[in-house]
Amino acid sequence: MKIKRISVFEMVRTFPQSYSLSRGRTWTSAENTFVAIETDAAIVGWGEIGTLGANYLPAFAKGVRAAIDELAPHLIGENPLQIDRINYLMDHVLFGHPYGKSAIDVACWDILGKATGMPLCDLLGGRFEGGLNLMADPGAGPIEEMLASVASFREQGYRRLSVKLGGDVAEDVSRMRAIMEHALPREEYYFDCNRGWTRDQALRVMRQIRDLDVYIEQPCASYEDCLAVRCRTDHPMILDEIVDSPEMVMRIIADNAADLINIKISRVGGLTKARRARDMCVTAGLPMTIQDVGGSGIVQAAIFHLAQSTPKEFRHSVYDPLTWSDALTDAPIRVQGGGAVVEVSDRPGLGQEPLPGSRGNPVAVYGGRD
Ligand SMILES: [Mg+2]
């Protein structure tokens, strides 16, 4: 099988409400890039990446498209079923920029699933029983709004809550206390500062919330600062933004730098590298939340398939990008039965096809036209 053509589509998704993180970063919309890889066997694979502006991660929509422009001409004529080889080739022709490679990698996995008639979770290791616990991500805001948002997610059955902090010590401590005052026994809380504290600020917060049974997530920007904070608190530590490659996961394991790891598929370069990172975490006994930055039904399917092929005790939660976006695909998986628990479908590949008309005309096409 050979890659015949690669088409790129852009789509702006407008959020139902504005979304904020620490240090005043606020977004009302984001850009998604879709990739369709057509083969000479008449199979089409889909990939997608969503970014959150240009200041959440070292990734942005124009960078995605520039990376694909660099990569795509090298991939025409290659066999999309040889996915490790495709990744090796992409790393050879473009150093770094893993986010720019993610949608291509995911599209190759979709092709492999469709060619074999197997759902991706089977190809990524096999379907582990049980549903996936969705995490709620209400975003940062005034405390009354956050309490209302957490209550609404609770009503829908969510038991894993990612609560965003702002980066101000006093405000963050009162926000954490207000939220935990209403917490129910079976709920688990990730308090996420998204790189917002300096080391001293993080340590002051940790001292003031010693009695709270919560996770602390990505307190500081640098790995060294997060590690220093971890060494001086007994709260379980989650690392997120810093986890940008399987190599970084290896380092975190070697340094004993985290108790739980967030794997965002596009941040590490796609499903191939996310699977490597996942397998290292399982080997090291580290649970994960499996996520991506955002997107529609294609991103959602990639997240859910990777999570479904992860042993139950290691998949702490999954992120559902459809909290902030429409599916735009033909079989969207929504929260079922009020339980905030989902299971991925048995359809081959990702099991999701973009709806006709959901993506407009391609902004770039590589390879021959019919
Ligand atoms: Mg996070």
Image: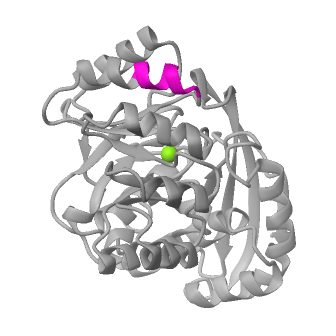
Q: Residue furthest top?
A: 144
- Residue in the image at 27% along x and 34% along y: 212
Q: Is residue 313 magenta?
A: no
- Which residues are drawn in magenta? 168-175
Q: Residue 338: percent from the left, percent from the top?
A: 20, 29
Quadrant where the image shows the N terminus: bottom right
Q: Is residue 170 magenta?
A: yes
- Residue in the image at 42% along x and 75% along y: 253
The coloring applied to the image is one colour
- Residue in the image at 75% along x and 46% along y: 10
Q: Nearer the viewer, residue 163 or 38?
A: 163
Q: Residue furthest left?
A: 185
Q: Residue 35: percent from the left, percent from the top?
A: 68, 60
Quadrant where the image shows the C terminus: bottom right
Tell me the chief SS of the magenta region. Answer: helix
Is residue 301 left or right of 67 when viewed as pictured?
Answer: left
Q: Nearer the viewer, residue 232 or 26?
A: 232
Is residue 214 left or right of 116 when viewed as pictured?
Answer: left
